[in-house]
């Protein structure tokens, strides 16, 4: 939905056969967003099986190609939130990988538990983003709302925006970075994946959008539901372009995709510039728009299908070359150590709580590979994690809380360790699934 903006700078991509979908929110022109909608999925495919490493590589190569494809002097840029959904044939669950650069958020609604996972918005006000911006020689202007990079850009990660990428450091060290954060979620059939640009998220919370889209769509057409949700954003005085994409996971898509366009208040508009904007927006999505006059009838908006204008703008570019994606070796191993045995015994303590005893025989502590312990939140003195670490001193290189959101250092009884998110830790373990988990 164009909303009240003079120009429409959003783009999106959806391909059920690939299991890919994405939204792009452009700024200072629509060229970067249009480029990403035509090219990023090709870079993802060229990077091989979808993984965190391949998504990082695809974003990097796509941004490099964009630099050489934009007109000289162009300041256009775009956020990018790209999702891949693949079925795990062994478990029947769905693996959702999301790479996000900017403030176009992705939300996963788990229907059975009525819980939400969401990506992090990359904005200059975020402490980690501000630190990178200032380290690169930039400033964050707090007098603006929202705060802006060098007083200009309201998102701190984006494709393009190359005027903010002139530093000597790596792409991840620039004032504005295209390097995405990658999320790996496990979903079930019937869960919902929502991608939207910030025009939606600045108006409604993730919970509100889930309520309007996922919980209200059982008996209604999804397209109508999305249109009504965007109209609610307009009614709440949203002042941005609006793009909202929603997918019920595991549900077979329609055999033929269709495009429905509503001309809004076209018939009530008299201003030529606004009418030109209406016409341009309709042509973009493959419709001509005219006011149709019939005898003894009120005027009607007449839509006729035509070739989209502009059509694909970057189709002449060659297909991205297949990339060799380096995947780092796992840093942690749960392989058995020869000559060493360990056991955990549960015994009632005088207070009725659980105690642990360890039996580690004939092994130098240095022979043990670091182990991973996974548990509930609350890892202070006296908790399960603390007692297990005490029972096996020096054996655990990391502790993982189910609710930990970011890596952070910690300490239990003077012993240093690190919290990391469970899904991130699984990527580092040599033998997937082998965890001490409770």
Image (tube, helix red, strand yellow):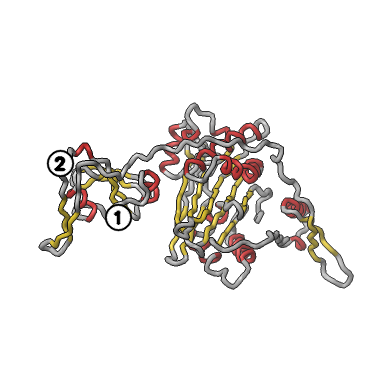
Q: Is residue 91 above or below residue 327?
A: below
Which x, y percent locates residue 205?
49, 59
Residue placed farthest to the right in the image? 295
Asked whether residue 29 appears in the rendered view, the answer is no
Report helix, strand or loop for mark 1: strand
Left or right of residue 384: residue 6: right
Which x, y percent locates residue 109?
48, 61
The part of the image, by quadrant, that contains residue 90 is bottom left
Query: Residue 362 shows which numbered tag?
Result: 2
Name the residue located 82 percent from the left edge and 69 percent from the top edge: 298
- Which quarter of the rendered picture does the C terminus lie within? bottom left
Which x, y percent locates residue 404?
34, 52
Please name whichever residue, 438 or 224, is drawn nearer the observer in this view of the structure.
438
Left or right of residue 330: residue 151: right
Density class for disc 1 (Cα within 10 Å; few <14, some 14-19, many ≥20) is: few
Q: Are marks 1 and 2 in contact (CB under 8 Å)?
A: no
The part of the image, by quadrant, that contains residue 271 is bottom right
Residue placed farthest to the left in the image? 350
Name the residue located 59 percent from the left edge and 73 percent from the top edge: 219
Q: Is residue 226 above or below residue 150?
A: below
Which label sits in the foreground, 1 or 2?
2
Name the residue located 60 percent from the left edge and 40 percent from the top edge: 77
Query: Residue 238 shows which numbered tag?
Result: none
Q: Is residue 29 above or below residue 237?
A: above
Left or right of residue 419: residue 360: left
Q: Which residue is mark 1?
A: 437
Residue placed farthest to the top in the image? 168
Which comes before the other along the chain, label 1 or label 2?
2
Please name whichever residue, 363 or 348, is drawn nearer the observer in this view of the structure.
363
Density class for disc 2 (Cα within 10 Å; few <14, some 14-19, many ≥20) is: few
Residue placed farthest to the front in the image? 339
């Amino acid at each position: 939905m164009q909303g009240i903006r003079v120009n429409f700078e959003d783009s999106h991509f959806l391909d059920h056969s690939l299991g890919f979908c994405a939204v792009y929110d452009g700024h200072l022109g629509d060229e970067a967003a249009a480029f990403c909608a035509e090219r990023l999925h090709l870079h993802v495919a060229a990077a091989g099986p979808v993984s965190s490493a391949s998504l990082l590589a695809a974003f990097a190569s796509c941004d490099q190609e964009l630099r050489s494809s934009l007109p000289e002097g162009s300041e256009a840029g775009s956020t990018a939130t790209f999702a891949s959904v693949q079925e795990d044939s062994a478990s029947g669950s769905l693996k959702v990988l999301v790479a996000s650069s900017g403030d176009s958020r992705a939300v996963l609604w788990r229907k059975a538990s009525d819980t939400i996972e969401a990506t992090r918005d990359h904005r200059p006000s975020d402490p980690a983003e501000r630190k990178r911006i200032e380290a690169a020689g930039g400033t964050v202007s707090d007098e603006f709302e929202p705060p802006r990079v060098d007083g200009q850009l309201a998102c701190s990660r984006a494709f393009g925006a190359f005027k903010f990428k002139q530093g000597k450091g790596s792409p991840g060290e620039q004032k504005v970075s295209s390097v995405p954060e990658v999320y790996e979620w496990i979903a079930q059939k019937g869960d919902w994946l929502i991608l939207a640009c910030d025009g939606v998220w600045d108006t409604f919370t993730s919970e509100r959008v889930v309520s309007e889209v996922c919980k209200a769509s059982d008996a209604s057409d999804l397209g109508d539901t999305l249109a009504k949700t965007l109209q609610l954003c307009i009614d709440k005085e949203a002042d941005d372009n609006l793009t909202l994409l929603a997918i019920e996971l595991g549900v077979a898509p329609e055999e033929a995709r269709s495009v429905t366009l509503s001309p809004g208040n076209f018939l009530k508009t008299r201003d030529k510039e606004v009418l030109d904007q209406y016409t341009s927006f309709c042509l973009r999505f493959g419709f001509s728009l005219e006011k149709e006059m019939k005898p003894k009838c009120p005027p009607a908006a007449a839509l006729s299908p035509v070739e989209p204008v502009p059509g694909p703008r970057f189709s002449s570019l060659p297909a991205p070359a297949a990339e060799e994606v380096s995947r780092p070796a796992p840093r942690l191993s749960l392989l058995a150590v020869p000559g060493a045995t360990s056991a955990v015994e549960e015994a009632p303590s005088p207070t009725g709580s659980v105690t642990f005893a360890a039996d580690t025989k004939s092994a130098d502590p240095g022979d043990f590979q670091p182990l991973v312990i996974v548990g509930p939140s609350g890892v202070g003195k006296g908790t399960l994690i603390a007692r297990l670490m005490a029972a096996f001193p020096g054996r655990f290189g990391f502790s993982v809380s189910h609710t930990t959101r970011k890596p952070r250092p910690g300490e239990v009884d003077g012993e240093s360790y690190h919290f990391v998110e469970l899904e991130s830790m699984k990527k580092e373990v040599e033998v997937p699934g082998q965890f001490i988990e409770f």
